[in-house]
Amino acid sequence: MFIQLTNGILRNLQKLNFWILISFLVSLGFVIQFKFLDDSVGHNQKYNTVVSDGKGYYAYLPAIFIYNDLNFGFNQTVEKHDHPETWYTDYRYKLDKKRIFTKYYVGTAIAYSPFFLVAHGWSLLMGWQADGYTAVYHGSVLIAALFYMVITMIFIGRILDFFSINHWIKVLCIVGTYFGTNWFYYATWEASLSHIYSAGAISAFLYYNILFMKTNSRRWGLVVGVLLGFIVLLRPLNVLVILFLPLFHKNFSIFLVWFKSLFAKPLVLGLSFIAFLATISIQFIIYKIQIDQWYIYAYLNEGFNFLRPHLIDFLFSFRKGFFVYTPIFLLSLVGLFYWFKSTFFHAFWWLLSMIILTYVLSSWHMWWYGGTFGTRVLIEYYIIWIIPLAILFQKTKGNAKTTFIIIFFFFIFNGVLQQYQYRKGIIHYEDMNWQKYKDALLYPIIP
């Protein structure tokens, strides 16, 4: 019986989904303990999951389902006066006295919506305060983020199968990256921001594109059309994910053959495009209701300066540098070297597409993206970074593999520590420099 039990445990351990379940349970335990039970961080934490930009995303839900007010008048009454325990944010923008809107896009609210509706229904059923801003509603957003974390992990595993990555390397890369980067932080602490949901949508989009590329079927065409529309509703700039589609073909010529073959099936292509347009039209309809016009550039005076990108700052600065606060992905660059040796086209296309993406993201007028932990705008692209990381562990052997795995675990430890430091204010949310980073390094382990 003991041998059978042991064999059963080993079979379960061989399943990627088992490790995803463990990741979910650990994350849920962290949320319960440090968001809802731990008074040492302040009793307000359970009321402050929906914060910052998340306020603007979330506002669509009480506006539509509770107050019937897409001009967000409840921001000045319910939010400001009835919930002093929350961190108040005025996310409204005015064209005139009557036309009020929010610059934040509706996609993230759509991602929350099933969980919000459960929280709202439960609050009504139990006779609790059902105004959209009690702890139950904040908790629903946390559960939404953990759900999308699970979705992301599942689809990353399936995408890595396309590159013939073996089981334990998949587990190591996915779970290690999750806990060792700001992915975990934004899934469990500031769960109302859009990046966790974008990561899930992008991972699903890439996987279903693999299926679509194999069959050109109407079914998968509709799915990828809806998913691409959802990705745009979440963050319009994430449409750049299409840059990476050639990665899932043996070479660029084969990708072009597939692309041209779509035009031989106009019904499939047309249905996919209609699904895309129908999905993004949700935002235009909301604008029409709010301000009586179909479109507005909602970010007003904010935008890109493509003549002055901050590439070096974006990647290496102590303020927000991607490789400073997620050094795990330095190993992805090493993996890129091995990828070039085995499949030149894939590695070249990965590098070219990532350079374009990084150039665009670093051209935003506020290249550090405000008060954040690390470079949050790349979280949705961790699936892309994980591919060369997995290839590194797949291609190396012996002492080289052992060395890289040791470095990887050190980076995981460093990532977990930095998340703790950020939550405690040791790492500043916006104003880091070399001196502050040096003082925070390994603190409080080495005071």
Image (spheres, rainbow, N blue to C red):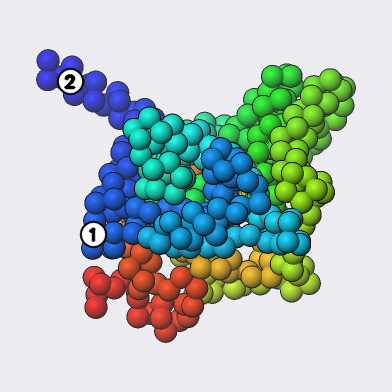
Rendered view: 264 above or below 297: above
Frontmost residue, 104 versus 374: 104
Q: Residues within 10 Å of mark 2 (few under 14, many from 20)?
A: few
Q: Quadrant of residue 163?
A: top right
Query: Hey, what amino acid is under mark 1?
Result: Asp
- Which residue is painted at 54% across and 48% down in the image? 58
Q: Disc 2 designates what residue?
A: 5
Q: Disc 1 designates what residue?
A: 39
Compared across the picture, whether 287 is left or right of 124 comes to right
Q: Quadrant of residue 18?
A: top left
Rendered view: 184 above or below 220: below
- Determine whether the residue tagged by mark 1 lies in a helix, strand or loop: helix
Rendered view: 228 above or below 43: above
Frontmost residue, 447 versus 75: 75
- Determine whether the residue tagged by mark 2 lies in a helix, strand or loop: helix
Frontmost residue, 218 versus 311: 218
Question: Quadrant where the C terminus lies?
Answer: bottom left
Q: Compute the Cα span from label 1 to label 2.
A: 41 Å
- Which residue is painted at 18% across and 17% down in the image? 4
